[in-house]
Image (tube, helix red, strand yellow):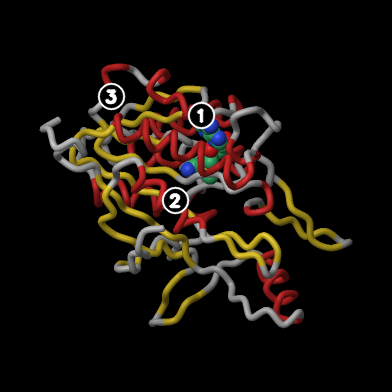
């Protein structure tokens, strides 16, 4: 396991609630995707690490947040997802963005991104300036909460059928193996010097079982030759007058309360880890690319 890199930057990506970030900019069915990136987080990453006209790739595109924010910023974008219903959603969101004046173009492909190099247009290989993505963590880690008269239930927490290849159902080691394959292919898609940004969170599977997914993802990214350049915290809470204004769901608050009653001192999660890595300008073998 490589040395952890400290968090060196804070992204204020939740000054507006998530629903305000998406309202009118995304089709209403977007709420059916269980694990979306905050639009302000995607926009911040794209604006900071690319220029207009650059190509942005999300190999696990979900509802298409990366694509929508990229084309609104005048970048071009390519997205892949294994679930046809999510690629249809991403296409609907891209169409809405284009109808609202987004000047970039986006292509959406349905397929297993572990075979990314077979799916992507050959003309895009080695041309991507930024890979921006967030892997799935399984059904327990995502979802919307609905309050009912009988209590609280989760909806939209599943990624679809237990289709072979969907990393949400692959178990932790399957997720890491699949993500390693996707990152290795993404490395080939990048231009030399291009950037990879991964957003993710640690997962608490049972109250006493804490999985350091950001640390694991950082390790596999380095295995495929990417060089860590920064670790940031993308806020899932607002910051006002130096105070954190949390936006946690009732479900998350109940889980924290229950853990504390059981003597486990957990806190509400207020940020997502952002790993920023780069493809070297010289290939690992030392030859100029
Ligand atoms: C956390 S979500 C990404 C959300 C996306 N960033 C957004 O903002 O909507 C992860 C996505 O990875 C997709 N996925 C899982 N396994 C995959 C695979 N092998 N190839 C491509 N996509 C995959 C899931 O269907 C899911 O939509």
The mark lying in front, picked from 1 and 3, is: 3
Residue 60, position as x, y percentages in the image: 48, 36
- Residue linked to disc 2: 217
Secondary structure of the residue carrying tag 3 is loop
Q: Is residue 184 left or right of residue 282?
A: right
Mark toward the viewer: 2 or 3: 2
Q: CA distance from mark 1 to mark 2?
A: 30 Å
Quarter of the figure with residue 19: bottom right
At x 74% / y 56%, what residue is drawn? 146
Q: Which residue is mark 1?
A: 92
Percent x, y of residue 183: 39, 38
Left or right of residue 190, residue 97 in this image:
right
First along the sequence among labels 1 and 3: 1
Q: Earlier in the sequence, mark 1 or mark 2?
A: 1
Tag 1–tag 2 contact (CB < 8 Å): no
Mark 2 secondary-structure assignment: helix
Q: Depth check: give the residue in front, 78 or 138.
A: 138
Q: Is mark 2 within 8 Å of ligand 1?
A: no
Residue 178 coordinates in the image, percent (x, y)? 51, 36
Would you name the residue on which mark 3 appears?
Answer: 125
Of the 4 image quadrants, the one containing the C terminus is top left
């Amino acid at each position: 396991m490589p040395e952890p890199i400290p968090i060196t930057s804070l992204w204020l990506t939740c000054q507006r609630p998530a629903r305000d970030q998406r309202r009118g900019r995304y089709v209403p069915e977007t709420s059916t995707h269980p694990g979306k990136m905050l639009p302000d987080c995607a926009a911040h990453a794209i604006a900071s690490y690319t220029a207009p006209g650059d190509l942005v790739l999300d190999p696990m595109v979900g509802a298409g947040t990366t694509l929508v924010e990229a084309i609104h910023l005048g970048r071009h974008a390519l997205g892949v997802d294994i679930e046809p219903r999510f690629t249809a959603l991403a296409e609907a969101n891209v169409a809405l963005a284009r109808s609202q004046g987004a000047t970039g173009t986006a292509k959406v492909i349905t397929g297993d991104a572990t075979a990314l190099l077979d799916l992507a247009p050959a003309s895009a290989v080695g041309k991507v300036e930024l890979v921006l993505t967030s892997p799935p963590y399984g059904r327990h880690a995502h979802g919307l909460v609905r309050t009912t008269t009988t209590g609280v239930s989760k909806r939209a927490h599943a990624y679809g059928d237990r289709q072979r290849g969907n990393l949400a159902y692959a178990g932790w080691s399957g997720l890491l193996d699949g993500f390693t394959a996707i990152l290795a292919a993404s490395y080939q898609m990048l231009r030399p010097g291009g950037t990879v940004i991964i957003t993710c969170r640690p997962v608490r599977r049972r109250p006493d079982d804490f999985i350091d997914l950001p640390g694991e993802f950082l390790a596999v990214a380095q295995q495929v030759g990417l060089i860590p350049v920064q670790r940031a915290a993308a806020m899932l809470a607002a910051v006002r007058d130096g105070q954190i204004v949390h936006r946690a769901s009732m479900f998350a608050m109940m889980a924290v309360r229950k853990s504390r009653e059981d003597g486990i001192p957990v806190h509400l999660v207020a940020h997502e880890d952002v790993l920023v890595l780069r493809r070297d300008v010289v290939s690992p073998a030392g030859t100029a690319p």
